[in-house]
Amino acid sequence: MKKFLPCACVVVCLVSIILWQVFSTDKNYYLISVAVLLCSMLPFIISFEGGRTDAKEIALIASLISIAVVSRAVFYLVPQVKPIGAVVIVSGICMGSKRGYLVGAFSAFISNFIFGQGIWTPFQMVALGLVGFLSGLIFNKVKANRINLAIVGFLLTFALYGFIVDLSTVLMLSNSFTLSSALAVYGAGLPFSLVFGLTTSIFLVLFGEAFVKKINRIKTKYGVCEVAYE
C-alpha cells in the first residue's frame, strides 16, 4: 500500500491542476505546465534524495527525452505520424515505470515549444507520461517481442493517449457540455488517434526490439539503474 501512496498523491495533484486550468478564468498555460512537470518529477526527486539516482542515470534519461523530442520534431509536417510514443514506451520498458513517466511528461512539454503550448499541453504530458508508466508495468511481466510491442504500443497510444488528449477539448466545452458534443469531439479525434497508434506500432515493430537491446546494453555497461524503483 505504501508503495502506491506516492503515485496516488501525484495523480490527485495532477487532476487538481488540470481541473484548475479548465475552470479558472485566469489561465497561465506555462505556469500550469510547469506545475504538472513538478508533480511528475516527485517520484524521481524522492528517489534522488534517497541516494538511488546518480549522474549516469540522469544523463541517460535526458538522452531519451532528447531522442523523443527530436523524433517528434523531424516529422513536424506530417500530422500525428510521430515516433515519440515508441521512444517513450521503450524508455518505460528499459528504465522502469516511474522513469518512463518522467520521459513522457518532459518530452511532451519540451516538444510543445516547437508545436505550440496551450490548454492541451498538461493533458499531453499526463497522457504520454502514463504511456511510459504503463509500458514499464506491462513489460515487467510480458516479454518485449515485436508482436507484444506492436499490440501494447497501439493500445496505449490509440486508446489511452487519444482519450486523455481529446478530453482537453471536451472540457473546454464546459459551458455548453452535452453527451453529443463530447461524442462529436472523440469522433473527430478518432482518425488522428488511429494514425498515432498505427505509427507507434509500426516503429516498434521495425525498431523496438533493437532499441530495447541498445538501451539495456548501455545500462549494463555503465551500471545504470542497478537499483530499480517501479
Image: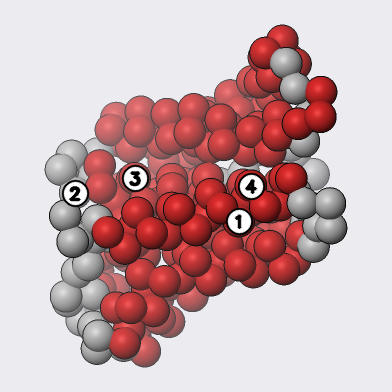
**Which of the marked residues, 4 or 3, is nearer the chain's N terminus?**
4
| Residue picked out by circle 1 | 17
What is the x, y in percent for residue 211?
Answer: 36, 55
**Which of the marked residues, 1 or 2, is nearer the chain's N terminus?**
1
| Alpha-carbon span between mark 2 and mark 3 | 10 Å
**Which of the marked residues, 3 or 1, is nearer the chain's N terminus?**
1
Q: Is residue 192 above or below residue 26?
A: above
| Residue picked out by circle 2 | 140
Q: Residue furthest top?
A: 180
Circle 1 residues within 10 Å: few <14, some 14–19, many ≥20: some
Q: Is residue 110 above or below residue 115?
A: below
Query: Of circles 2 and 3, which is in front?
Result: 3
89 left or right of 144? right
Under tag 4, what secondary structure? helix
| Alpha-carbon span between mark 4 and mark 3 | 23 Å
Seen at 43% across and 45% down, the residue is 131
Say which of 167 and 226 sits in front.
167
**Which of the marked residues, 4 or 2, is nearer the chain's N terminus?**
4
Say which of 43 and 101 sits in front.
43
| Alpha-carbon span between mark 1 and mark 4 | 6 Å
